[in-house]
Amino acid sequence: MSDKSKISLAIQQVINTMMIRVMNKVLIEDPFIKEKHHAQKPLYAALVPDEIFKGSHFERRFVTPFGGVWEKLAQVVAKEAHGECVMGHPITGNVPEERLRRIQEVLNRLEHSQNGQNKCLPNWQEELAYILSGQGNPIPVSVICDIYIRNITTNQCYAFELKAPLPNSDQTKVSKEKMFKLLSMEPALVTGAYYALPYNPYGTSKADYQWAFPKRWFNMCCDPCVLIGDEFWDFIGGDGTYANFIFEVNQLGKTYRERIYREFLGIEPPHDIDNFLLK
């Protein structure tokens, strides 16, 4: 079996496992019972159609098992391509004291204006060069990265902060601080550290990305440490991985959307069901 086929199968298995769990929950273990809904919330039932609350019932049972879906998908893809991938991996090393001070200085300059001037604009390469020029006594530091990949052939190691496509400002700041610390360790314990988003809701290139909050901390269009969509998936799985991922998700999506319409909502799928595709 080719590497591409192995990655396709791994993606299918992750999504199928989660969707089977969701379907079993909403159809068998905890179905929406309209009589129970009417008894518990008679005012709601009198004002709002049952179908609205039936959809909410499904959503609540869908969101929880899919909370870590991006990490799980990244893990199975990276394992096939690199050999080793761990979620929530701790890395402990020594960072020179002055580098730790400079990390906080850089973050503070991005967050607060200095002497009445505008806040600094992010520039990963300049910031990192400034931090790494610092020395001092070694301080033990531990960082937990979302995704850790080790290529068993080259022994190169990569750390990723993998966030939802529309992250908030606070979590982005934490991610940048962790990345700085990882790359400041002596001796070096990772080949690279990256801020990754699984897809771009605004378009197909980094230049299209518009969500304001992470832009406070990264130049989302230019910083080389930022990977969005195809850059991330092709980095961890090889060329063509993102296209393969999109294809598999859309194939599975068509099947499960039809099942949800018929088996859960009890209606026929709309004629434009194939228009709802991940791109």
Image (spheres, rainbow, N blue to C red):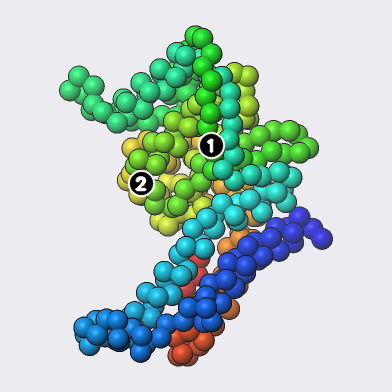
Mark-to-mark CA distance, 2 and 1:
19 Å
Q: Position of residue 49 (x, y in %)?
A: 29, 86
**Callout 2 secondary element:** loop
Q: Earlier in the sequence, mark 2 or mark 1?
A: 1
Q: Residue at x 72, y 39 (%)?
A: 151
Report the residue that reaches farthest toward the left.
116
Mark 2, other Cα within 10 Å: few <14 / some 14–19 / many ≥20:
some
Quarter residue 94 falls in: top right
Q: Residue at x 47, y 14 (%)?
A: 97
* Residue 5 visible in the displayed image: yes
Residue type at the position of mark 1: Ile
Q: Is residue 279 above or below residue 263?
A: above
Along the line of sight, the residue nearer the viewer: 24 or 219: 24
Relative to 6, is 261 on the left or the right?
A: left
* Residue 218 visible in the displayed image: no
Quarter occupied by the N terminus: bottom right
Q: Is residue 45 above or below residue 4?
A: below
Q: Are marks 2 and 1 in contact (CB under 8 Å)?
A: no
Relative to 24, is 268 on the left or the right?
A: left
| Residue to which mark 1 is pinned | 144
Tally the marks: 2
| Residue to which mark 2 is pinned | 168
Q: Position of residue 245 (x, y in %)?
A: 61, 60
Q: Residue at x 27, y 81 (%)?
A: 41
Q: Position of residue 72 (x, y in %)?
A: 59, 54
Q: Position of residue 175 (x, y in %)?
A: 45, 37
Residue type at the position of mark 2: Asn
Q: Is residue 112 above or below residue 135?
A: below
Along the line of sight, the residue nearer the viewer: 86 or 30: 30
- Please give the label number shown on residue 111: none
